[in-house]
Image (spheres, rainbow, N blue to C red):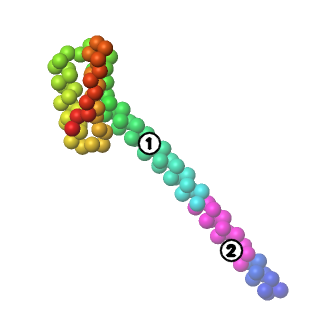
Amino acid sequence: MENASKALLIAGQVLIAILLLTLFSYLFTKMNEDTSKIREQLEQNEKLKFNQQFLVFDQREITAQDVATIMNLAKENNTEPKFPTTIEVKLNRYRYNRRIK
């Protein structure tokens, strides 16, 4: 009888250990998913903030001075190549693409 009660105690402890491991695994996975979502949102906001400085010139006719400003802005931003910048200028029907280094 003693052996049977000890076996039941050991089986109960093993079940509790398995349940705890499953719970920790589930929590780790959920926290990892949430962290990934937050990281993606932060990267998206950072890209949006970066692009805002160029989108000012997008919806209007620009002057030669604006083109020079955009080129200098791109050159300054390409010192840290986190977001490599390519400038596209459309003059009537012609396009001019240039990657600024």
Q: Main secondary structure of the magenta part?
A: helix
- Residue 53 quadrant: top left
The residue tagged 2 is: 13
Picture quarter with the N terminus: bottom right
Which residue does the image show at 40% across and 41% down from the upper left? Answer: 42
Q: Nearer the viewer, residue 54 or 89?
A: 89
Residue 11, magenta (yes or no): yes
The single residue placed furthest to the bottom in the displayed view is 2
Question: Disc 2 marks which amino acid?
Answer: Gln
Question: Disc 1 marks which amino acid?
Answer: Glu
Camera-nearest label, 2 or 1: 1
Q: Earlier in the sequence, mark 2 or mark 1?
A: 2
Which residue does the image show at 31% across and 39% down from the upper left? Answer: 83
Q: Secondary structure at mark 1?
A: helix
Asked whether the viewer can see residue 56, the reply is no
Asked if 58 appears above or below 8 in the picture, the reply is: above
Picture quarter with the C terminus: top left
The residue tagged 1 is: 40
